[in-house]
Image (cartoon, coloured by chain):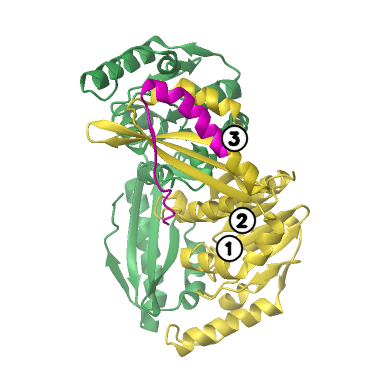
Chain colours: A green, B yellow
Amino acid sequence: MSEVRWAEILTIGTEILLGDVLDTNSQWLSRRLVRMGASVRRHVTVGDDEREIVTEVRHALSRAPDLLITTGGLGPTDDDRTLSAVAQALNVPLILNEEALKMIAQRYKELFESGAVDSPEMTPSRTKMAYLPAGGEPLLNQVGTAPGVWLAVGKTTLVCLPGVPAELKDIFTNALPPLLKSVLGTGYYSERLYEVTCKDESVLSSILKEVASAHPDVYLKSKVRPFGTSVRIRLFLSASGVRPEDVEQSLRQTVDDLLVQLEPMGILLIPIPTDDEE
Amino acid sequence: MSEVRWAEILTIGTEILLGDVLDTNSQWLSRRLVRMGASVRRHVTVGDDEREIVTEVRHALSRAPDLLITTGGLGPTDDDRTLSAVAQALNVPLILNEEALKMIAQRYKELFESGAVDSPEMTPSRTKMAYLPAGGEPLLNQVGTAPGVWLAVGKTTLVCLPGVPAELKDIFTNALPPLLKSVLGTGYYSERLYEVTCKDESVLSSILKEVASAHPDVYLKSKVRPFGTSVRIRLFLSASGVRPEDVEQSLRQTVDDLLVQLEPMGILLIPIPTDDEE
């Protein structure tokens, strides 16, 4: 059985560290990567500070994930420093990429024709978005103007996406799938969610502990939510792997082991749908 | 002028890396820390994995922030490993803290009396929450059961908060202010938000670049949002410092410098309220 591939996400944006903007991209990306069978091991956010970005890109690459996704800092303004920092982290120059330049010119032509911008002209700040770290390939952005970028760095595939959620989702959904498939392989993911008829997380604790240690391949988590003056407890299980039948069997056995202990205590597990909302 | 104090936030929870739960705590904490005059330099999220937590706590402490806040992993279940990992990162033992034990017993007494739990008994998993890294002091949790913890580590004050947002907010709002005041000092923060009557971020780019480089103490960010078939551009400015009059003057001068360049182009800055919603 080959190994589960793993990913890290590096978010770049001072607005997030100021609490001015909520980072929803990391969750959106993580849900999708996990469902492709990947393990997401770390989210990091730094500001629009070239030195900090360089430090974190190097840290991440030193851990050699299969996939490192950066979000943010690809736009035309001077505080968009991601590509410059990535080039510095890799010790490669920024090079004008003709394909990226064509993508950007085409997008500004479309935006000009729809009246969204006042001119289709390729100004220096628009052209800046076509300078990619040497070795980088552009990924078409059909919503905004800044292309995404991907680069092979040793064992790691480094993907830079814009921070605007609609642009990130467009590139991830439309331009990235073939690349992701080759990086992440054909992983399999499955999950279960149950309502637990018990109001006290701590009484579940020893049972969960025992069952979890017998099934280290399954993620098992009790979730406590306030519910009136009481609490509501849910159990969430998920697992990833390469063979679907192995993953499903692991989940089934884990649930069986839980039921053996919970049923004599009169505690039920009521299956509920795992909402896949954004 | 003394220096602006700085903070990092370390979020602990596999559910966040799975994309199962959106991390809103980092934004909530950052907004408040920034408004106390602190600079937030980094958000990091790792899973419920003791080795990963130890690594990240050590990394953060090696950067010696004034404040390091961890969230998550304080509960009664076996996957709540934050305090054990912090003890390991600091090479200190976990010690039963009598004050924490009293807090927890009192909370379970209250929860039992309100019918929220089936027994007030201090089971091993409940008692586990009273084992703090040596030198740690408990912070009363009036919503859940796990106390927060604070610890002085050299120049850094390390604060561990629960991951459940209502519990984190309770401790931050009620138990933490005196400590935060002594750590962060009396910083001052101010911000401005403007609607820009211009539809193209890239035409603003060179102006923002010039003004931003003349005012390195001011955070200056254009924010582009889709608006029908067009886009809407806003300008956000903020600054922190020790003397309120210096901070306000920096912001005023930055806006003046922007207007000198924008007004001849027929571009207006329309002040709008900076919503402080959660």
Region of the chain picked out in magenta, as a range: B251-278
CB atoms of marks 1 and 3 within 8 Å: no
The reply to whether dot 1 and dot 2 touch (C-beta < 8 Å) is: yes
Residue at x 53%, y 44% (from the top left corner) = A17
User: In the rendered view, would you say B53 is above or below A269?
Assistant: above
Instruction: Kindly indicate the quadrant of the structure image that contains residue B180.
Output: bottom right
Marks 1 and 3 belong to one chain:
no
Q: Tell me which corner region of the image, top left, top right, bottom left or bottom right, holds residue B181.
A: bottom right
Q: Earlier in the sequence, mark 1 or mark 2?
A: 2
What quarter of the picture does the N terminus of chain A occupy? Answer: top left
- Which numbered marker is on residue B69? 2
Residue B105 falls left or right of residue A34: right
At x 39% / y 9%, what residue is drawn?
A98
At mark 3, the secondary structure is helix
Which secondary structure lies at badge 1? strand
Which structural element holds mark 2?
A: strand
Q: Amino acid at mark 2?
A: Ile
Q: Which residue is mark 3?
A: A56
Residue A223, relative to residue A159: is it above or below? below
The amino acid type of the residue labelled 1 equals Leu
Which x, y percent locates residue A198? 39, 78
Measure how far apart labels 1 and 3 are at the Cα level: 25 Å
Q: Are marks 3 and 2 on the same chain?
A: no
Taking the spot 71% from the left edge, 54% from the top edge, the residue there is B89
Q: Is residue A225 left or right of residue B190?
A: left
In-image side of A159 versus A48 (left or right): left
Q: Which residue is mark 1?
A: B161
| Relative image position of residue B23 (x, y in whole percent) | 46, 53
